Amino acid sequence: MTAIQAVRGMNDILPDEAELWLEFEARVGDWLARYGYRNIRTPLVEHAQLFRRAIGEATDIVEKEMYSWRDELNDEDLTLRPEGTASCVRAAIEHNLVYDGPKRLWYAGPMYRHERPQKGRYRQFHQYGVEALGFPGPDVDAEHIAMCAALWRDLNLRDIALHLNTIGNAEERARYRADLVQHLEKHQDRLDADAKRRLHTNPLRTLDSKNPMVQEVVASAPSLIDYLGEASLSHFDGLKSLLKAADIRFEINPKLVRGLDYYNLTVFEWISPHLGAQGTVCGGGRYDGLFAQLGGKPTPATGFAMGNERLIALLREVGRKPELEAPHAYVVHQGVGTLEYAFVLAEDLRGRDLRVVLHAGGGSFKSQMKKADGSGARYALIVGEDELKAGEVSVKPLRTDQPQIRVKRDALASSLQGNG
Ligand code: HAM
């Protein structure tokens, strides 16, 4: 029979890799707590309409990347979440989360997009998302960017560059959009199929086209920043001056518009030069219109999300190896009645916070000792019929030349703890 494999673009994370994930998650957990963010958990499955409304009909995600299906039993269209912001805002509206003031929230977990898989781009991938609901900014916008900078420092990831832009408010964008469309129409012959298709649905996306010919057309297009009014510009200035005060370097990228339609004012991306085409490790921005768009009270908000697979690939790149927590002890046993004795002994030691592996599956004394050595444990705890009768355990240090000793069972835990 042929073996069944994982679904394309959805990866197993095997133990060697998972240890690095655990270490990464522990650091991110500490970092989120340092900034006063609280966890929120929303379902992986939502109504398809949520993402259509939030992310926008004319985006890549909604047009071609969502895992959606019709649930005939309940007569509803459902979708595996492609991102977390829409769910977070949906939950905040549904549970009236910001009724008593703004909230700082984070979430983590798998997201699903039916993209063409390649290095750094998967169909199931994992994000940490951070959302600040009810804050008009620009102080919180700056807080989010400073948070990212601090995390890269904590993780020792050095050359991740911050690309920053402002895309104004809806009216400013509408005026700009009209002029941009005019410009693009004048140069229709040099647009590719994608740009032509987007011309009347999502022309701003053309700004970050990767096609050199389209880029040339875009280079001579009007600039969005010239369409911004005083309020938008002063928001941006406020953000920039906080970043400067905190010594955070940024590059203004007027072509940065992001792939989701809910943004206004601040947008940003952090890009690493070490990951090829999928170098964006984190992206976000302000989405002041989203609450109202999803049927809630108008509420200013901003946030970002980072891709775990990409950050962990970077950690590997800088040679980060997980710190393995080897067991304190590996218990081997041989002889009548020794399994029960060893089993209870191992349970007792674990109850005292020691990491203990009990040999399972039998085998000769020699092969058990080989397993003990291979486990990385500091000690082999040996239980034979002699030890059983005497109520003792033989302790053999596996990482030093110290001699093997016999210890009373009751004294064992403190003797192991005393030895680290
Ligand atoms: P996004 O830019 O679509 O934003 O995704 C954020 C990050 O998730 C990306 O920068 C990337 O690191 C990672 N990512 C996205 N797609 C994939 C993929 N197919 N494979 C691997 N990693 C991927 C959002 O999702 C917004 N919800 C961010 C946000 C939060 N904006 C405001 N609040």
Image (cartoon, rainbow, N blue to C red):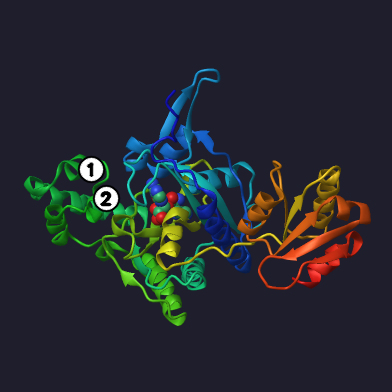
Q: Would residue 134 be visible to someone looking at this image?
A: no
Q: Position of residue 31 (x, y in %)?
A: 58, 66
Q: Is mark 1 within 8 Å of ligand 1?
A: no
Q: CA distance from mark 2 to mark 1?
A: 7 Å
Residue under label 2 = 205
Give the numbered dot on residue 347. Answer: none
Q: Quadrant of the C terminus?
A: bottom right
Q: Position of residue 15 (x, y in %)?
A: 55, 51
Q: Residue at x 23, y 43 (%)?
A: 198
> Taking 199 as reference, is 68 left or right?
right
- Residue sitting nearer the eye, 50 or 60: 60
> Taking 212 as reference, is 51 left or right?
right
> Taking 371 as reference, is 241 left or right?
left
Q: Position of residue 40 (x, y in %)?
A: 61, 50
- Residue sitting nearer the eye, 184 or 164: 164
Mark 2 and mark 1 in contact? Answer it, CB < 8 Å: yes
Q: Secondary structure at mark 2?
A: helix
Q: Residue at x 84, y 54 (%)?
A: 348
- Residue sitting nearer the eye, 192 or 240: 192
Tell me the amino acid under the disc marked 2.
Answer: Arg
Q: Position of residue 259 (x, y in %)?
A: 34, 50
Residue under label 1 = 198
